[in-house]
Amino acid sequence: MVRLGVCILLLLCRTLAMCDKPSTPLGVSMADRHKYLAHNGMFLCFNGDTSIPIAHINDDYCDCPDGSDEPGSAACNVALGFWCTNEGWRPERIFSSRVGDGICDCCDGSDEMKHGTACVNVCHEKAVQEEQERSAHAMKLQRGEAAREDAVKAGQQRTVERHQMLFKNIPQKLAELHYAKDFYRAAKKIQEEQEKNEFRAKQKDILAVYAKEVRIGEVSQKGLLAILAHLALVKNEESAEIFLDLLQELVPGRLEVSEIDVLAAALAEVEQGAPKELVDAQEEASKAWQQAQADPSKVVEGEMEKLEIAYKQAKRNVQQSAREKQKARRHGFLSALQAETLAINNLIDLILWGTVELNQGQTLLDLVKARLSHLSPAVKPMEVVEHKRLEAENIRQRLKNVTDTFEEVRKYINQLQREESEDYGIDGEFYVLQGRCYEKEHAGELFKMCPFGNAYQGKRLIGGWAGFHKQTDWHSKYRMMKFLKGSSEGCSQPREVE
């Protein structure tokens, strides 16, 4: 009987001990649980000055000045907020003002547990959703890392290829092209010399017949010199150089003729545009005519006639001056060419072959007619034969092809050198953006951005590539792209974008 009483007493004491075991108040985290332990049935407010009965915690009334007695209600503005246990997901802290507001902020619904709002525990669903989002984000990161690795490989591969081209392949190609150009230039010179000789042989017979037909042999030496000077200066230094070459070819041994003096005479200044004397006279007459139109009463009798006479006289003076300058220019050219020492037949040969080279058949005929009034009107301009040597044409085409290829290689070298100087990122990962463009429509406008190229708003240039831009010192230098020196149409300064 005594033993039974002892057992009952021990069981009662154990029950009472379990009842006295402190529980965690609603809205309090396990980390803050110790702050709510009772001391002789009392709770010490966080401010350390006030104690209240432990039963007053979460009674929806602010007993503590700092509100620490209401962690599970919205009665006080508690700095710690409300702790959502959220078993099955992850705990979180919300503002105390959200407790009992009829909205289930905690996924376990603990913030509305004592306030009549029925909340469904969705912590498991949130955990599943978060895991799915985490997995999706991880996969996105993996894809990004894989894409970056591919971009780095592409950039590095391009660097290897570029160096291979710049320092090995292209130098070899240029050497081959230089050799080919030299070879075809030499071959072209030989073929064109043969072509020229064949052409001259055909044209020579035509010239012999035409010289008799146009009766150029009847023109005086003075006339022949005038014709020679006119033809030789018809295209300034270009035609003068042709006659100089013909002189050396047709009249060998005249090495004393100075090429510099001949070309200098051909390049002697020829007045361009209306001379100042003529312009002034014309402006004065025009001004007087406008005044007469505005107020005829102010016109002085005979003034307009005087101005007209002055203008005509100025025009005659200008024409006379031009003739004198042209005469002096032709005389200087003939002197430099030492044309007056040439025999008549040499002058005729120079004139005829110069006419052929310059294709001035009609000009020659007009010049001869001006000096031979009895020349038959039936005489036509001299015929110039067409002669192309097939071998010469082939060589010219091959030389052109080699020259074109050489220029293409030079352009490619410039492109590679621009690439070599460009910043494609730490590991060359941005090279894959080369040659790509990205478009986006905004506010009814189509914007187009081409890294390492240009940026456009519609068809308007809003900037050219100016490199990467880090915006602030703590940003990565590759954070942004900058485009400068765009169109200034409608703006006070060129557009730019980043």
Image: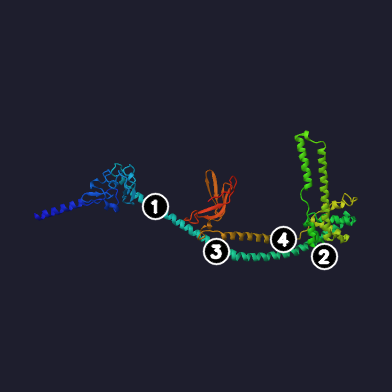
Task: Give the side of residue 402 with respect to residue 61, left or right.
Answer: right
- The residue that disc 1 covers is 132
Mark 1 touching mark 4, by CB under 8 A? no
Q: Nearer the viewer, mark 3 or mark 1?
A: 3
- The residue that disc 4 covers is 396
Q: Circle 3 — which element?
A: helix
- The residue that disc 3 covers is 160
Q: Quadrant of residue 295?
A: top right
Q: Nearer the viewer, mark 2 or mark 1?
A: 2
**Amino acid type, callout 2:** Glu
Q: Disc number at residue 324?
A: none
Q: CA distance from mark 1 to mark 4?
A: 72 Å
Q: Disc number at residue 256?
A: 2
Task: Give the side of residue 83 with respect to residue 149, left or right.
Answer: left
Earlier sequence position, callout 3 versus callout 4 = 3
Q: Nearer the viewer, mark 2 or mark 3?
A: 2
Residue projecting furthest to the top: 297
Mark 3 touching mark 4, by CB under 8 A? no
Residue drawn at (86%, 57%) of the image: 225
Residue 111 point in image, percent of width and height: 31, 45
